Image (tube, rainbow, N blue to C red):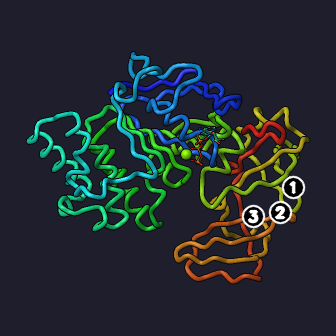
Amino acid sequence: MPEIRLQQLRKDYGAVNVIENLNLEMADGEFTVLVGPSGCGKSTTLRMIAGLESVTGGQIMIGDRDVSLLEPKERDLAMVFQDYALYPHMNVAKNMSFALRLARMNKSDIEARVKDVAATLDLTAYLDRKPAELSGGQRQRVAMGRALVRDAGTFLFDEPLSNLDAKLRGQMRAELALMSQRIKKNMIYVTHDQVEAMTLGDKIVVMKFGEIMQAGTPEELYRSPANKFVAGFIGSPTMNFLNAELVDDAGTLFAKGDGFSIPLPDARKGALQAHRDRNIHIGIRPSSFAEGPGGLKMPVILSEYIGAQSVLISELGGQRVSIEINTVAPIRAGEEREFTVQGDEVHLFDPKTEAAL
Ligand SMILES: Nc1ncnc2c1ncn2[C@@H]1O[C@H](COP(=O)(O)OP(=O)(O)OP(=O)(O)O)[C@@H](O)[C@H]1O
Ligand SMILES: [Mg+2]
């Protein structure tokens, strides 16, 4: 299982450039997730790796092989699409073994592989059924199984769970995570669901307009987003963004805005020197608010009680913010409560470039 490297990858559709210069390395056996809004080039990137789409410029390296110009079947990979189509007249076992039969693998080896993968995907009891006799989630698993029986070095998934309802999606996500722990292969997984990205990825690659905004572990992206786009994309509920000014008061830096003034840790002073007395954007995750005396007095405009947690919609200096806190009993809308925010949980961004400061 070699590492995969995308080098100066470019894709034009006619006169339209959708990917200009994409560079990415994926380690051996890594689960890489490509995320980003619709149209940012996730499927195009995956399809170029698969060989289903030509490369306009640059290289795709798998190990020390440049596969950019190779046929899909020469690349040692298997792909699962969003709109997978099972063969309706074949039972589950036949659907799963299709590629192996095509490759003329011998019968007992095929049976063993199918049995093995069916067990992994919890499909053993359904091997004799036709697709029409399966639930949506079971069909989805068969589509996965069809790819997994092939002992490819790399597996590519393009939104394989997007046709499922929320509950099934959650179940399949967990099964996928378990499966990838078991079979340590290169996996490249496209989704626009940031929860899927966070829970499945060893590495997450956030894309926008054909460019990589940041690549890193889920924790790196969550804790240290490189820019406002990644900060807003990763994390749910979404990070709150507020306008503020960096003000030095008796040696302490404050992020000061309409209705709030949050002291920032001294450790950040050096990096922020150039932005003193300037306007910046600050980002506060909903979960960074804590209820407590001496905090900011904020109105509860809307309160969503979810059990152990509540998400509140509030306002700070005329700007809407959401707050996520642990609750025992529901907090009522219309109340005013006090919330504190720790300075080291405040993210700061350059208002022009949107880069993290
Ligand atoms: N065959 C094509 N011809 C012309 N433009 C295309 C073609 N395929 C994709 N595009 C364009 O390339 C861009 C990237 O498309 P792509 O399918 O890679 O996006 P995506 O990130 O997978 O989006 P989604 O989340 O909606 O699936 C889009 O602007 C799309 O319109
Ligand atoms: Mg797509």
Q: Nearer the viewer, mark 1 or mark 2?
A: 2
Return the residue at label 1. Answer: 257
Apparent side of residue 184 relative to residue 127 in the rendered image (left or right): right
127 and 355: which one is in front? 127
63 and 125: which one is in front? 125
* Mark 3 Cα-neighbour bin, 10 Å: few <14, some 14–19, many ≥20: many
Q: Position of residue 49 (x, y in %)?
A: 47, 30
Return the residue at label 3. Answer: 321
> Where does ligand 2 appear, by image quarter?
top right
Apparent side of residue 229 relative to residue 112 in the rendered image (left or right): right
| Quarter the C terminus occupies | top right
Q: Residue 319's mark? A: 2
Q: Earlier in the sequence, mark 1 or mark 2?
A: 1
User: Which amino acid, mark 3?
Assistant: Val
177 and 285: which one is in front? 177
Q: Is residue 192 above or below residue 105?
A: below
Q: Label 1, label 2: how many angstroms apart (C-alpha)? A: 10 Å
Whether tag 1 and tag 2 are in contact, CB under 8 A, the answer is: yes
337 and 250: which one is in front? 337
Q: Label 2, label 3: how many angstroms apart (C-alpha)? A: 6 Å
User: Which amino acid, mark 1?
Assistant: Gly
Q: Residue at x 72, y 67 (%)?
A: 339
Q: Position of residue 149 (x, y in %)?
A: 24, 43
* Mark 2 Cα-neighbour bin, 10 Å: few <14, some 14–19, many ≥20: few
- Secondary-structure class at tag 2: strand
Q: Position of residue 303 (x, y in %)?
A: 67, 77
Q: Earlier in the sequence, mark 1 or mark 3?
A: 1
Asked where in the image residue 186 lies, by quadrant, the reply is: top left
Apparent side of residue 315 relative to residue 10 in the rendered image (left or right): right
Q: Residue at x 23, y 52 (%)?
A: 120
